[in-house]
Image: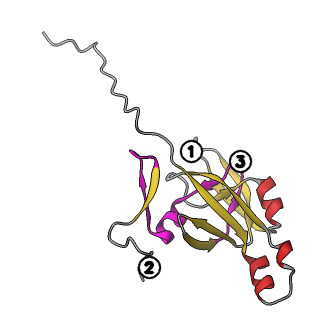
């Protein structure tokens, strides 16, 4: 007789969250520095560990980091959380996001208390999530640099 009340739980202890070192730079400040209109000492740069969140579409920055970078809030964007809640959140000026030696520039959403790297950065930088080894890896088809599809 088959026991349908038995529950087999399989836990893979090697799976877990992926965190990466990220360098964030105020893109507007960088342009001004490059044009000689801003002292390089005033360039907004912040380095931290970020959570790679494949469920998030955009990059998310906490307000304190937005302020440290000197980013302006350009507008509001409707965001939906994993639990279904919706909320209007700030949308920043462009920020340069450097991960694994690759960089891209995009506006970020302002919410929460930690940096989240979303799908747009992963797609643009051509990085894959290696959950088993808890890291990001370059797309094996383009290991040297990102390849953009047009």
Q: Secondary structure at mark 3?
A: loop
Q: In the image, which is nearer the foreground, mark 1 or mark 3?
A: 3
Residue 112 is labelled as: 3
Residue at 76 percent across and 86 percent down: it is: 34
Q: Nearer the viewer, residue 65 or 93?
A: 65
Distance (Cα) linking label 1 and label 2? 29 Å
Mark 2 or mark 3, earlier in chain: 3
Q: Nearer the viewer, residue 72 or 74?
A: 72
Query: Which residue is the site of mark 2?
Result: 148
**Picture coordinates of residue 125, whole percent (x, y):** 49, 70
Residue 105 is labelled as: none
Mark 1 or mark 2, earlier in chain: 1
User: Can residue 110 be found in the magenta stretch?
Assistant: yes
**Picture coordinates of residue 70, whole percent (x, y):** 83, 67
Distance (Cα) linking label 1 and label 3? 13 Å
Q: Tell me where the magenta segment starts and ends, as one range.
A: 106-134
- The vertical placement of 40 against 25, above or below, is below
Q: Quadrant of the N terminus?
A: top left
In this view, the residue farthest toward the top is 1
- The vertical placement of 85 against 60, above or below, is above
Q: Secondary structure at mark 2?
A: loop
Confirm or deny contact between disc 1 and disc 3 (CB under 8 A).
no
In this view, the residue farthest toward the bottom is 35
Residue at 41 percent across and 32 percent down: it is: 13
Q: Secondary structure at mark 1?
A: loop
């Amino acid at each position: 007789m088959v026991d349908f009340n038995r529950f087999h739980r399989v836990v893979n202890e090697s799976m877990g969250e992926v965190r990466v070192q990220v360098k964030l730079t105020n893109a507007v400040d960088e342009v001004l520095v490059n044009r000689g209109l801003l002292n390089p000492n005033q360039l907004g740069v912040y380095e931290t560990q970020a959570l790679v969140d494949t469920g998030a579409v955009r990059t998310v920055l906490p307000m304190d980091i937005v302020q440290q970078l000197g980013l302006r809030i350009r507008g509001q964007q409707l965001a939906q959380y994993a639990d279904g809640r919706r909320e209007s959140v700030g949308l920043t000026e462009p920020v340069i996001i450097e991960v694994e030696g690759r960089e891209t520039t995009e506006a970020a959403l302002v919410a929460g208390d930690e940096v989240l790297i979303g799908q747009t950065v992963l797609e643009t930088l051509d990085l894959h999530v290696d959950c088993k080894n808890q890291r990001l890896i370059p797309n094996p088809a383009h290991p040297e640099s990102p390849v953009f599809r047009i």
